[in-house]
Image (spheres, rainbow, N blue to C red):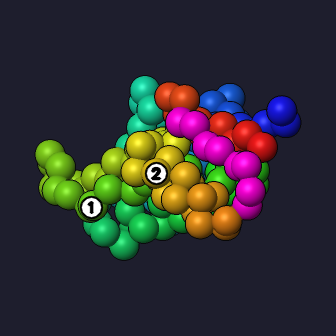
Amino acid sequence: MPSFDISSEVDHQEVTNAMDQAAREVGTRFDFRDTNSSAELGDGTITIRSMSEDRLRAVRQVVEEKLVRRKVSLKAIDWGTIEPASGGTVRQVATIVAGINSDKAREVNKFVKGLGLKGVQTQTKGEEVRVMA
């Protein structure tokens, strides 16, 4: 019985490399001087800070550019809202999404069943969906 798994994985080493490059660029670029801008990688999160929303958007653009260059899909990054932080700065936190959540797994199951293929079954196993013929 042939089968295959549908999953969503992020290469954390590439995310770390991209964030190191982004932090280095934010620290050395002339237009980020005296703006208190930073890009940091936490445990499954990316936090960016700056003095204004305009500079924050520029930091986000640098981070996204580095992630794309390292072949990390931006679909794996869930950006939160821009919120005020201490010291008159603004902050934005992004979550790195790994795996398929239960809602998305249900969508995949419904889609496969809707194809009407004879004898095809789906099974959700944790953060992946197995399709069997």
Tell me if 124 is positioned left or right of 44 in this view: right
Left or right of 109? Residue 102 is: left
Mark 2 or mark 1: which comes first in sequence?
1
Q: Is 80 above or below relative to 46? A: below
Residue at the far right: name it: 2
Report the amino acid beneath label 1.
Answer: Ile
61 or 98: nearer the viewer: 98
Q: Is residue 112 above or below residue 22?
A: below
Residue of label 2: 106
Disc on res. 82: 1
Q: Residue at x 66, y 37 (%)?
A: 130
Q: Residue at x 53, y 36 (%)?
A: 124
Mark 2 Cα shell of 10 Å, populated few (<14), some (14-19), many (≥20):
some
* Left or right relative to 126: residue 80: left
Instruction: Read off the magenta span.
Output: 117-124
- Point out residue 23 in the picture as x, y percentages from the top left corner: 55, 43
The residue located at (52%, 43%) in the rendering is 100
Q: Position of residue 4 (x, y in %)?
A: 77, 38
Q: CA distance from mark 2 to mark 1?
A: 31 Å
